[in-house]
Image (cartoon, helix red, strand yellow):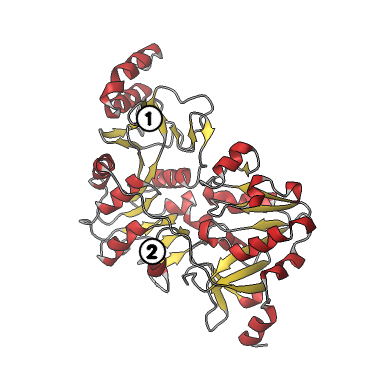
Amino acid sequence: MNVDDLLRGRHAASADALIRHVAPGTDLIVPIANGEPVTLLDAVERAADQLQGVTVHQMHALHDRPMMHGAFGDRLVHRSYFLSHITRPCFQAGTVDLVPNHFSEVYDVLRRRAPKPLVIASVSPPDRHGNFSLGVSADYAGSFIGRAPFFVEVNQQMPRTTGRNQIHVSQLIGWVDADYPLLEVSPIEPGEIDRRIGAFVAERVPNGCTIQAGIGAIPNSVLAQLDGHVNLGVHTELISDGLIDLIEAGVITGVNKANNRLKVIGTFALGTQRLYDFVHDNPTIEMWSARYVNDPRVISREPNFVSINASLAVDFLGQCASETIQGHYYSSSGGQSDFARGAAYSDGGQSFIVMQSTAKDGEVSRIVAQLAAGDVVTTQKNTVDKIVTEFGVAELRGRSIRERTRALINVAHPKFREELEQTAHALRYL
């Protein structure tokens, strides 16, 4: 049987054909963000009355769905591995559950929690060899290739990307056609404070290093200020719009990388249509599973690795609360700890945690003596390296508690420093 025969034999007329593969207790694995197969999940919800004990597992959902609001009871539920603006209120309402994790370990968590996995994903059209691409999302779904059944939606607007994200038609139990644009997430425009923070980081990024940058205005600001650097490499969780200009200008070349030399390695892409057009058929970009990209052991093999991520609060010990606000869940761990640990083990590596010194229009200090009750530590005190605000860089790695406390007070907003110092003396940290 040739490729064309296989394609015809596994092609379904409508997304409703998926339902005959969804048995009681099925665990539906759905990729992150734009990897979600919209037409297939629409079909699942349409058939909810026929289902029994079906769970959808997904990180960072971008589409609001009745199942997330408990519309189908236990017949069809959503389990999140990273809260988005869509799932956050559902979690707070108790209709979506959240599983704590490191992004590097989500596949392993799913293998334990999902005994009857069926991966449903949005993919690019097949090439002439019958290979579909997971497009902008390799994440944990890529690790299931060859290890679990796949039923996919072929979106004509999904970019074709390379890397370890290829599925041959013979590995599918079915596929359907779709044609709709990917959701765009525009980069947050950095303000003056963000640019000041970015400048502190950019001046400490050495030429020839390999970088990872998270999401947010400050990481975007750092990338924008690397235009004078040379021969940078990229090994990152997120492929963002901020990398495009640096790649096109030849700032990012990857010539010094120890692994995947000359390639930009990521596990998902999220941004504007410009980004999706850029990654399409671009041999420079490779999408690999988070099980590889985010593995601290893999990251550590890159010398001079630089990790840049944001946090919401940091205490005197250096503990970074990056997923809760005043004890209430906002997101999840993602890959922050993965990359901070990997950078710590890298020869010459650096890990930057960036944040504005205040929140709520300057009324709240993000540098605190102790985290709020219920706040979750994302990056541990023993892993943290450098904390950066608009007032400078606090070097914490290898420092004592007194040295950490003094360094953090020095980068706090001046109007909070006296109060922080008094509290530090009361705690006997100074």
Across and down, in percent, residue 385 comes to: 36, 37
Query: Neighbour class for label 2 at 10 Å: few (<14), some, many (≥20)?
Result: many
Q: Residues within 10 Å of mark 1 (few under 14, many from 20)?
A: many
Residue occupied by mark 2: 275
- Picture coordinates of residue 45 (x, y %)? 69, 58
Viewer can see residue 408: yes
Going 39% across and 61% down the picture, which residue do you hit?
Answer: 272
Residue 173, position in %: x, y?
A: 69, 72
Residue under pointer 1: 366
Amino acid under disc 1? Arg
Location of residue 407 (image quadrant): top left
Circle 2 — which element? helix
The secondary structure type at the circle numbered 1 is: loop
The vertical placement of 156 against 53, above or below, is below
Residue 43 falls in image quadrant: bottom right
Seen from the viewer's position, the closer of residues 294 and 362 is: 362
Image quarter (top left, top right, bottom left or bottom right) of the N terminus: bottom right
Where, quadrant-wise, is the C terminus in this rendering?
A: top left
Residue lying farthest to the top in this orientation:
426
What's the residue at 60%, 47% (across, down)? Answer: 80
- Type of amino acid under label 2: Leu
Labelled pair 1, 2 in contact (Cβ < 8 Å):
no
Separation (CA) of disc 1 from disc 2? 32 Å
Q: Is residue 371 left or right of residue 220?
A: right
Question: Can I make out residue 173 in this image?
Answer: no
313 sits left or right of 1 in the view: left
What residue is shown at x 44% (from left), y 66% (from top)?
Answer: 286
Q: Nearer the viewer, residue 111 or 117?
A: 117
Outermost residue, left direction? 228
